[in-house]
Every structure is written in C-alpha cells, then in structure tokens.
C-alpha cells in the first residue's frame, strides 16, 4: 500500500497516546518534587528516590516485557501494562505517605516498562513494511509532544490544583 490508503490512523494515535502518557508520567515528576516533598514532609533531594525507583523498575521490566510479549502476545502485555499503569496512577492520586508513594511509583514504573517496549513492537508487527516508517514517526511524536506539551501542562496543573491531581 502507498500513501494514506489503508493506513490505520486510529491504531497509530492510540499508540501515540500510550507513549505520550508514559513519557509525560516519567518526566513530570522531577518538576513536582518540591511540591511532593513539602506535602509529604521530606526534602526534594530525598523525594528524588521516587524518580530513581520508577526508572529502575521501568528499565528492568522493559527487559522482561519484550520476551514476554513475544510469548503471550503484544496486545495482552500492553493492555496489562496499561491497566497496571492506570491503577497505580489512581492510587498515587490518593497517596498520603512517602513510603506508599515510593511503592506506587515502582508499580507505575513496572507498567511503564511495558508501554514503550510493547507499543513500538506492536506497531512493528501491525503495520506492513511500507507503512512502518509513518507509524513509527507518529509514535515517536508521542515522546516529543510529552516534553513540549505534557510536562508543562502537568506542572501548571499541579501548581494550581496540587500534585495529586496530575496522577488522577
């Protein structure tokens, strides 16, 4: 196929959204650290452990998510990752202790480890070779739009409504 004919924009935009959410969630926490630290009675430096915990969990699980999705299917792993990501984010909205926040950010990180790994792999499997470049371009935009729009919008919302709101 060539041109726009047959290109599944809906699938590409859903996967774009998955990557947008994952990257926004990853990058948004750093600007929120002073608000989180003040609210949970710790220092911003100590609160930084939530960034490390999330990143480490995501990195480790990304190594597992790829082979797991090869065995049981990309869609199953991706949907499970999205479900855990949503659940952990919802619980983060309601968190009231620093220890609980660290645990929930680790859970969110595990889920995030599936998002980029499986979204990109799913696109590679789903789109024919002739459309794969376009699909990967749309998905990759999710990374950059998250930095340009997602993070500043989230930081503004957190300043106005509180950091919990960003995870709700």
Image (spheres, rainbow, N blue to C red):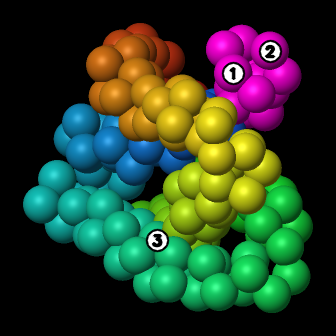
- Residue at 24% across / 36% down in the picture? 31
Q: Secondary structure at mark 3?
A: helix
Of badges 2 and 3, nearer the viewer stands 2
Q: Which quadrant holds the N terminus?
A: top right
Q: Tell which of 93 and 38 is nearer to you.
A: 93
Residue underneath mark 1: 2
Q: Which residue is mark 3?
A: 58
Name the residue tied to disc 2.
5
Examine the rendering and report whether any part of residue 82 can be seen.
no
Q: Nearer the viewer, mark 3 or mark 1?
A: 1
| SS at circle 1 | loop
Please report the residue visible at 19 percent of the width from the left and 66 percent of the height from the top.
46
Instruction: State left or right for residue 149 relative to residue 42.
Output: right
Packing grade of label 1 (10 A; few <14, some 14-19, many >=20) is few
Q: Quadrant of residue 107?
A: bottom right
Asked if marks 2 and 1 touch (Cβ < 8 Å), the reply is yes
**Horizontal relation, residue 88 to residue 140: left or right:** right
Disc 2 and disc 3 in contact, CB within 8 angstroms:
no
C-alpha separation, residue under disc 3 versus residue under disc 1: 36 Å
Q: Nearer the viewer, residue 43 or 77?
A: 77
Magenta region includes residue 10: yes
Q: Could you classify mark 3 by the number of other residues whose Cα lies within 10 Å: few (under 14), some (14-19), or many (20 or more)?
A: many
Quadrant in the picture for residue 128: top right
């Amino acid at each position: 196929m060539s041109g726009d004919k047959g290109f599944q924009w809906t699938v590409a935009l859903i996967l774009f959204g998955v990557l947008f959410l994952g990257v926004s969630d990853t990058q948004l926490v750093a600007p929120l650290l002073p608000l989180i630290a003040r609210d949970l009675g710790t220092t911003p430096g100590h609160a930084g452990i939530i960034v490390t915990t999330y990143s480490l969990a995501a990195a480790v699980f990304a190594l597992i998510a790829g082979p797991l999705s090869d065995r049981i299917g990309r869609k199953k792993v991706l949907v499970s990752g999205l479900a855990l990501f949503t659940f952990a984010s919802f619980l983060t909205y309601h968190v009231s202790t620093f220890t609980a926040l660290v645990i929930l950010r680790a859970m969110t990180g595990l889920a995030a480890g599936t998002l980029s790994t499986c979204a990109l792999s799913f696109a590679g499997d789903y789109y024919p070779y002739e459309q794969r470049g376009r699909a990967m371009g749309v998905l990759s935009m999710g990374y950059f739009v998250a930095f340009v729009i997602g993070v500043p919008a989230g930081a503004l919302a957190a300043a106005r409504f509180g950091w919990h709101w960003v995870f709700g």
